[in-house]
Image (tube, helix red, strand yellow):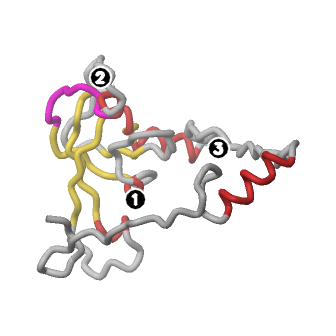
């Protein structure tokens, strides 16, 4: 859908999974198209090493700050954001649909469920395995005969910030 300068648009409120170029605080807000800046590859697909085609039209949209932030003190201040066309819909169509009692189409992110996987602790089967496990727990290898370890502290930079030379 093509928008023209001066046309009121609504930023869609969908919540995509993954990379997104539309600021969260602008979703669901109404603004006015300032300019059509041209067609560019879709950056949401470029982020995943895809070609970003077909190209999407990028619009410069102006928002009144008092509508973005409830306690914003200055009424005349505006914010201008570049938003791709697949994030925009005509604001007048949405308002007409709401007055008629129908709702504008909104997309929701799928509900995410966590799959909890618990690993069962396996007990060592033989006495030899138990001995190896207890020796490892003490910080010694199973084959060492209590040899002392020789470790030196890393050299520190003169600045005292812990960087190595």
Q: What secondary structure characterizes most of the magenta part?
A: strand
Density class for disc 3 (Cα within 10 Å; few <14, some 14-19, many ≥20) is: few
136 sits left or right of 62 in the view: right
Gap in Å between the C-alphas at discs 3 and 1?
26 Å
Residue bounds of the magenta highlight = 36-43
Q: Quadrant of residue 44?
A: top left
Mark linked to residue 77: none
Expressed as whole percent of the image width and height from the top left, the position of residue 66 reads 33, 71
Expressed as whole percent of the image width and height from the top left, the position of residue 25 reads 40, 59
Would you say residue 118 sits in the magenta stretch?
no
Q: Earlier in the sequence, mark 3 or mark 2?
A: 2
Of the two numbered discs 2 and 1 in the rendering, the one whose residue sits closer to the viewer: 2
Q: Earlier in the sequence, mark 3 or mark 1?
A: 1
| Residue 33 visible | yes
Q: Secondary structure at mark 2?
A: loop
At 25% from the left edge and 79% from the top edge, which residue is drawn?
Answer: 74
Mark linked to residue 52: 2
Q: Earlier in the sequence, mark 2 or mark 1?
A: 1
Q: Secondary structure at mark 1?
A: helix
Of the two numbered discs 3 and 1 in the rendering, the one whose residue sits closer to the viewer: 1
Mark linked to residue 25: 1
Q: Is residue 76 above or below residue 122?
A: below
At 59% from the left edge and 41% from the top edge, which residue is drawn?
Answer: 108
Q: To which residue does mark 3 refer?
A: 101
Q: Secondary structure at mark 3?
A: loop
Density class for disc 2 (Cα within 10 Å; few <14, some 14-19, many ≥20) is: some
């Amino acid at each position: 859908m093509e928008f023209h300068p001066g046309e009121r648009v609504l930023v869609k409120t969908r919540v995509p999974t993954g990379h997104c170029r539309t600021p969260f605080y602008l979703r669901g807000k109404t603004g006015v198209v300032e300019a059509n800046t041209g067609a560019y590859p879709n950056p949401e697909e470029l982020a995943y090493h895809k070609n970003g085609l077909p190209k999407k039209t990028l619009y410069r949209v102006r928002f009144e700050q008092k509508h973005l932030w409830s306690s914003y003190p200055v009424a005349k201040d505006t914010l201008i954001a570049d938003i791709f066309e697949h994030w925009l819909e005509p604001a007048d169509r949405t308002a007409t649909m709401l007055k008629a009692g129908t709702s504008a189409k909104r997309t929701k992110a799928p509900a995410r469920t966590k799959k909890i996987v618990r690993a069962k602790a396996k007990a060592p089967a033989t006495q030899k395995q138990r001995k190896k496990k207890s020796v490892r727990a003490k910080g010694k290898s199973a084959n060492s005969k209590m040899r002392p370890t020789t470790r030196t502290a890393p050299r520190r930079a003169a600045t005292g910030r812990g960087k190595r030379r």
